[in-house]
Image (tube, rainbow, N blue to C red):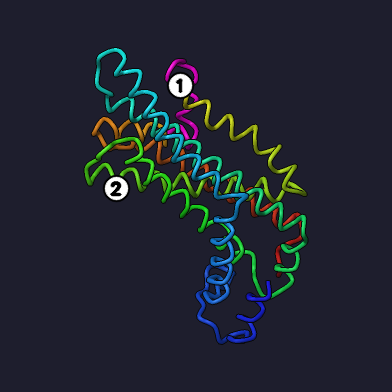
């Protein structure tokens, strides 16, 4: 908070580097301060466990599947490695994106720092970008690390597909996290409320391997598209259909619209 105010004093009301986006003005010196603050938050003991757990889960599941295959006298198939990658990426995208973002925002509400930010020179768009981009970056980094953790060596085209889908799903997840964070009054209530949608977003694609209904339902979730992307990467067929991309895009836009409505309803938007 103090660093944001210092940045405002240093650059003045109109002297900072800025760009107009719609009706909002993004001052990049203020945004950089928020980004730095939020990035450091990702490495706090409350949040760093989530991405580390996801990479560890991918590695442990790969070892487990490999042990099962070895006991049957077989080598571990890449499709099974894709299952381990899918599980780790799903946990990372939902837990890091929704839970960490929601709990961080709920903490700011609980400690009344969010209201203080909104009454300072920081506008809603700067706060939104500063809160979501570091988490999305963390998700993307962990999803990249999960690929070698699963023992996969994808082609350049497969890497491009995986990076693109992971980035889009990271955005969808973080915006959802902002929605839950703005609705909750404390970290405890946020963690309780978020556990249900997080479980659904993870388990529907997982059970899609065994149920036709679940498989169809997962096609309408961004996590389902991410799971299919992991399978495509492992199979060496790096492609995502237009419907899947449309699902992610629609859910990002819908979640963003809901967040903006809740943000204004709670009186944080400054005119």
- In the picture, residue 131 is in which quadrant? bottom right
Q: Which callout, 2 or 1, points at the residue further toward the start of the chain?
A: 2
Q: Which residues are magenta?
A: 208-225
On the picture, is 73 further left or further right than 201?
A: left
Main SS, magenta residues: helix
Label 1 near label 2: C-beta < 8 Å?
no
Instruction: Say above or below: 27 vs 210.
Output: below
- Give the x, y percent position of residue 34: 58, 67
Residue 257 visible in the displayed image: no
Instruction: Say above or below: 269 vs 14.
Output: above
On the picture, is 135 further left or further right than 60?
A: right
Residue identifier under label 1: 208
Q: Residue at x 46, y 55 (%)?
A: 137
Image quarter of the N terminus: bottom right
Residue identifier under label 2: 160
On the picture, is 63 further left or further right than 221?
A: left
Q: Residue at x 58, y 29 (%)?
A: 200
Residue 194 visible in the displayed image: yes
Instruction: Say above or below: 40 vs 12.
Output: above
- Of residue 248 and residue 187, the one placed in the foreground of this image is 187
- Give the x, y percent position of residue 269: 70, 63
- In the picture, residue 225 is in which quadrant? top left
Q: Residue at x 74, y 43 (%)?
A: 188
- Of residue 250 and residue 153, the one placed in the foreground of this image is 153
Task: Measure the C-alpha gap from mark 2 to mark 1.
Answer: 25 Å
- Of residue 77 and residue 10, the one placed in the foreground of this image is 77
For disc 2, the neighbor class at 10 Å (few under 14, some 14 to 19, many from 20) is some
- Give the x, y percent position of residue 125: 59, 64
């Amino acid at each position: 908070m103090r660093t944001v105010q210092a940045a405002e004093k240093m650059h003045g009301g109109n002297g900072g580097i800025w760009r107009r986006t719609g009706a909002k003005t993004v001052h990049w010196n203020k945004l950089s301060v928020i980004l730095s603050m939020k990035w450091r938050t990702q490495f706090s003991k409350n949040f760093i466990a989530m991405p580390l757990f996801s990479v560890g889960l991918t590695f442990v599941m790969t070892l487990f599947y490999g042990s099962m295959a070895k006991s049957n006298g077989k080598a571990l198939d890449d499709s099974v490695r894709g299952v381990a990658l899918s599980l780790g990426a799903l946990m990372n995208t939902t837990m890091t994106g929704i839970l960490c973002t929601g709990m961080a925002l709920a903490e700011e509400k609980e400690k009344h720092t969010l209201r203080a930010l909104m009454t300072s020179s920081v506008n809603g768009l700067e706060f939104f970008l500063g809160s979501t981009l570091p988490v999305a970056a963390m998700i993307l980094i962990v999803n990249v690390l999960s690929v070698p953790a699963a023992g996969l060596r994808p082609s350049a085209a497969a890497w491009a597909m995986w990076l693109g889908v992971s980035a889009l799903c990271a955005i969808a997840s973080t915006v959802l996290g902002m929605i839950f964070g703005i609705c909750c009054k404390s970290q405890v209530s946020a963690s309780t409320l978020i556990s249900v949608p997080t479980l659904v977003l993870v388990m529907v694609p997982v059970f899609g391997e065994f149920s036709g209904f679940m498989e169809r339902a997962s096609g309408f979730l961004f996590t389902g598209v991410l799971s299919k992307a992991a399978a495509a990467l492992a199979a060496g067929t790096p492609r995502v259909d237009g419907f899947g991309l449309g699902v992610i895009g629609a859910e990002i836009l819908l979640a963003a619209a809901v967040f903006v409505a809740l943000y204004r309803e709670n009186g944080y938007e400054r005119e």
